[in-house]
Amino acid sequence: MEEVLKWLAKAGKDLAAAKITKKQNLFDVAAFLSHQAAEKALKALYILKFNRLWKIHNLEKLAASINADLKMQ
């Protein structure tokens, strides 16, 4: 569980940084950090489900592996 919490904390920091860079009109940086936040949050869920880290950067495959809903709202 400690590993899961570490990944979620990292995701939270990336998301906070994305919000700051968005306010500064640094949209490319904000987009990159948002992707990183999503990836780290999904990896936390993957670790929770499978008890191991999957080193992948494809959000769709990672989300599908944990049966995440891929619908955007």
Image (cartoon, rainbow, N blue to C red):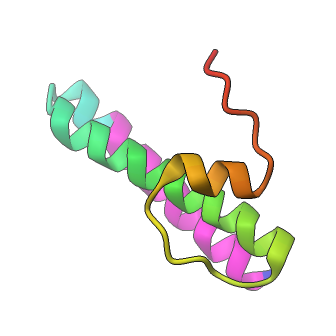
Question: Could you tell whether 49 is left or right of 56 in the image?
Answer: right
- Residue 41 screen position, x and y as percent: 61, 56
Q: Which residues are magenta?
A: 2-19
| Left or right placement of residue 39 versus residue 53 in this view | left
* Residue 12, above or below 69: below
Task: Please name the residue shown 61% across and 57% down the image.
Answer: 62
Tag count in the figure? 0
Magenta segment, prevailing SS (helix, strand or loop):
helix
Q: Residue at position x 51%, y 56% from top? A: 39
Query: Magenta segment: does it hold 7?
Result: yes
Comparing 62 with 5, the one in front is 62
Estimate the x, y position of residue 66 in percent, counting from the top left.
77, 56
The foreground one among 29 and 72 is: 72
From the viewer's perspective, is 58 left or right of 4? left
Give the residue drawn at x 47%, y 55%: 58
Q: Quadrant of the N terminus?
A: bottom right
Furthest residue to the top? 73
Q: Is residue 3 magenta?
A: yes
> In the rendered image, which quarter is residue 9 located in?
bottom right
Q: In which quadrant is the C terminus drawn?
A: top right
Q: Would you place residue 60 above or below residue 56 in this image?
A: above
Please name the residue shown 75% across and 34% down the image: 69
Q: Is residue 60 above or below residue 9?
A: above
Of residues 53 and 9, the one drawn nearer to the viewer in this rendering: 53
Vertical arrangement, residue 24 with respect to residue 49, above or below: above
